[in-house]
Image (cartoon, rainbow, N blue to C red):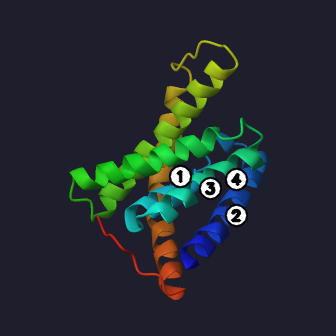
Amino acid sequence: MRLAALFAIAGLIALAIQTTMTRLLPFAELMPSLTVILVVELARHHEGVMAVVMAFVIGYAADALSGTQLGLNALIYTLIFIGVRWFAQRIDGRSMTAAMIAVFGGVLAADLLNFGLSSALVGNRPRLAPVLPLATLQAAVTALCAPPLFRVLQRSARFVGLRPRTTW
């Protein structure tokens, strides 16, 4: 229950920042994907059904607030959670570098899947060439912003009495 409350609050704050700042800043395309950072943190330190459900809920909330196809980000964020867990099992990922790589890959996957699936749903043939440089840049910016946010989330989890079940 504490896990759900902590990530619900963090998710709402992240979504509020993402949805308002992208409208206010001239470089909105470079806004870090805070919700992907949350999903990667869930995958890094929490296992079980509750963590997967929280990743799904964060994605669904992103869909509801962004006006995209309902369920698209929910699916993508659940896949990112599963991908990060798989990545964690293949490497010794206790380092922050591995976490930053997971965030980079998660943001890149989210952007490309979102673009590709959105285009396919409306019947357009997706052309990734114009999207790839900007998606890569956003993934890099998000990966660089991830370490301080990981620390804040980990301190918040300790504050509410959560202990990570897994540590890569």
Image quarter where the N terminus lies is bottom right
For marks 3 and 4, give the CA distance: 5 Å
Is residue 119 visible in the rendered image? The answer is yes
Q: Which mark is residue 12?
A: 2
- Specify the amino acid type for callout 3: Ile
In this rendered view, identify the residue nearer to me: 13 or 23: 13
Cα distance, mark 4 to mark 1? 13 Å
Q: Are marks 4 and 2 in contact (CB under 8 Å)?
A: yes
Circle 4: element type: helix
Q: Which residue is mark 3?
A: 58
**Residue highlighted by disc 4:** 61
| Disc 4 to disc 2, C-alpha distance | 8 Å
Q: Residue at horizontal 52%, vertical 31%?
A: 112
Q: Residue at x 65, y 67 (%)?
A: 8
Discs 2/3, front: 3
Q: Element at badge 2? A: helix
Q: Judge the density around disc 1: few (<14), some (14-19), many (≥20) Cα neighbours within 10 Å.
A: many
Is residue 17 positioned above or below 134 on the image? below
Using the image, determine if residue 15 lies above or below residue 125.
below
Could you say where residue 147 lies in the image, as x and y percent from the top left?
Answer: 43, 64
Location of residue 46 (image quadrant)? bottom left
Residue 27 shows up from this direction: no
Q: Alpha-carbon distance for marks 2 and 3?
A: 8 Å
**With respect to residue 68, does 123 lie above or below?**
above
Amino acid at pointer 2: Leu
Which mark, residue 36?
1
Element at badge 1? helix
